[in-house]
Image: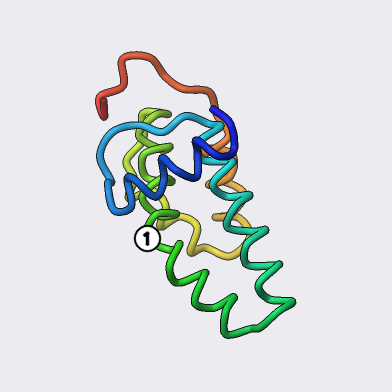
Amino acid sequence: MDFKEAVRSCFNNYANFNGRASRPEFWWWALFCLLGSLILGVVSHKLSAIFSLATFVPYIAVAARRLHDTDRSGWLQLVGLIPLVGWIILIYWLAQESKSGSRYA
């Protein structure tokens, strides 16, 4: 999956928290959100904030699907609320390989 397909897929599954997402889909989406926010932040902080709000739900949805692909619950994203340690754990989980036969298929 390339950058364009990943962004299209995430917008098509805007609020779909079921199923699975591959590593490339998640990480291309994360890059899109980061670059979009940074570029729009240079132009206007309001535009950056609007972009971030518009991509928040699909970001949470693709992260939940990515965790499902590693055979974990999407609710484990809440671990990211723990400063620093939670972020490290969440990034580790999101970077892991897919598990075949996931119960979240």
The reply, left or right, for residue 8 in relation to residue 19 is right
Question: Closer to the camera, 101 or 89?
Answer: 101
Image: 78 above or below 28: below
Q: Nearer the viewer, residue 65 or 13?
A: 13
- What x and y, as percent, mark residue 21? 41, 33
Q: Quadrant of the C terminus?
A: top left
- Quarter of image, res 24: top right
Query: How is the protein colored in the picture?
Result: rainbow
Query: In this picture, is 12 found above or below 40?
Result: above
Query: Helix, strand or loop at disc 1?
Result: helix
Amino acid residing under circle 1 = Val
Residue where numbered disc 1 is placed: 57
Question: Which residue shows up at 70% across the image and 67% down it?
Answer: 39
Point 51% across, 40% down: residue: 26
Circle 1: is it few (<14), some (14-19), or many (20+) Cα within 10 Å? some
Q: Is 105 placed above or below 13 here?
A: above
Residue at 34 percent of width and 45 percent of height: 12
For the image, the number of numbered tags is: 1
* Left or right, 44 with reference to 81: right
Q: Position of residue 43 (x, y in %)?
A: 71, 79
Q: Quadrant of the N terminus?
A: top right
Q: Left or right? Give the position of 68 relative to 18.
A: right
Residue at the extreme top:
100
Q: Position of residue 85 (x, y in %)?
A: 60, 55
Residue drawn where x is 31% and y is 21% of the image: 102
